[in-house]
Amino acid sequence: MKFGVMLPHRWVYASKESIVEFAKLAEELGFTSIWVTDHIIVPADRTERGHIFYEPLITLACVGVQTSLDLGTCVLMLPARNPILLAKQAATLDLLSQGRLILGVGAGWIREEIEAMGSSFKLRGRMEDEAIELLKTLWSKKGPINFNGMFWKFENMIFEPKPSRKIPIWVGGKKKPSIIRAAKLGNGWIPWAISPEELENGVRLIEKISRKKIEVAIVTPVNMVRGSPNTYGGSLGERHWFLAGSTEEVLRGVERLVEAGCDYLICSFRDVRLFRDDDTSVMVKQAKAFSRGIMPSFTS
């Protein structure tokens, strides 16, 4: 079982100092990776996830020279990005970090954001599929490359440098199309705030579809406060389950996720969806409590 942690790269406490200091703390506490999420431009009435976002890959490049931890995105909106440019950025970051990048990708969910980036909300699933194929092609094929897709086409092009190894692509989302995409095209599945029951159902579907073993990761809020609720309503009316309560309650929650098939847990302490802290002090306190009270039971 591996543990990662979300960096404070969004909301009002985000700064170079808070991001770098927390990344260094994560390494001291024994986390194996540090993660960032993604929004580029958000509607003024949709700031529930925190409207201040430092750019993910630039943030990881900054902290990549400050720690030796793996660097992950959970998740980048593929339809909002040019996949050729993203392939170059990811390959460069992977090379400079000596093979530490995990690229989590997703289709995106805010229509206004995706359309503001010049993309199609309706076709975002197809665009994500093709973008994943294009990333793999650019990273692996030598010599002149041809690509003839629905959204991107080119002939006789050179793409260098290649990444240091096959960058793992983990697909986000907990609905059936995303799970199928992860099974068919990804090296991992990385849903958000998913219950053990939902996770187990997803793992079963992946096992039916995929001929290879893929990594099963979860990104989840963590609130280590006795008596705190462990579900919340999402922006689209859905319900999300997360880790909350006393050390014993959180420990049991992690055990349930492991039993359901979780290989990798990425913690978002004091997640901005649920809290509006002005500084990272509570986040730091909870990360320390989690590393002392939870992680030794799964990493020893």
Image (cartoon, grey):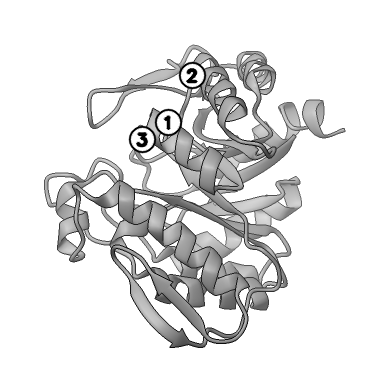
* Label 2 crowd (10 A; few <14 / some 14-19 / many >=20): some
Ranked by sequence position, the earlier of labels 1 and 2 is: 1
Residue 12 appears anywhere in the view: no
Q: Is residue 7 above or below residue 274?
A: below
Q: Is residue 196 left or right of residue 124?
A: right
Q: Residue at position x 68%, y 63% from top? A: 100
Q: Quick one: 126 or 199, which is closer to the camera?
A: 126
Q: Is residue 276 above or below residue 233?
A: below
* Label 3 crowd (10 A; few <14 / some 14-19 / many >=20): few
Q: Circle 2 — which element?
A: helix
Q: Residue at position x 57%, y 85% from top? A: 160
Q: CA distance from mark 1 to mark 2?
A: 8 Å
Q: What residue sits right under mark 2 in the picture?
A: 198
* Label 1 crowd (10 A; few <14 / some 14-19 / many >=20): some
Q: Residue 187: x and y, percent?
A: 61, 47
Q: Circle 1 — which element?
A: loop
The disc at residue 174 is 1
Q: What residue sits right under mark 3 in the picture?
A: 275
Q: Circle 3 — which element?
A: loop
* Mark 3: amino acid: Phe
Q: Residue 20: x and y, percent?
A: 57, 64
User: In which quadrant of the rendered view does residue 9 lie?
Assistant: bottom left
* Mark 1: amino acid: Lys
* Mark 2: amino acid: Glu
Q: Residue 272: x and y, percent?
A: 37, 41
Q: Are marks 1 and 2 in contact (CB under 8 Å)?
A: yes
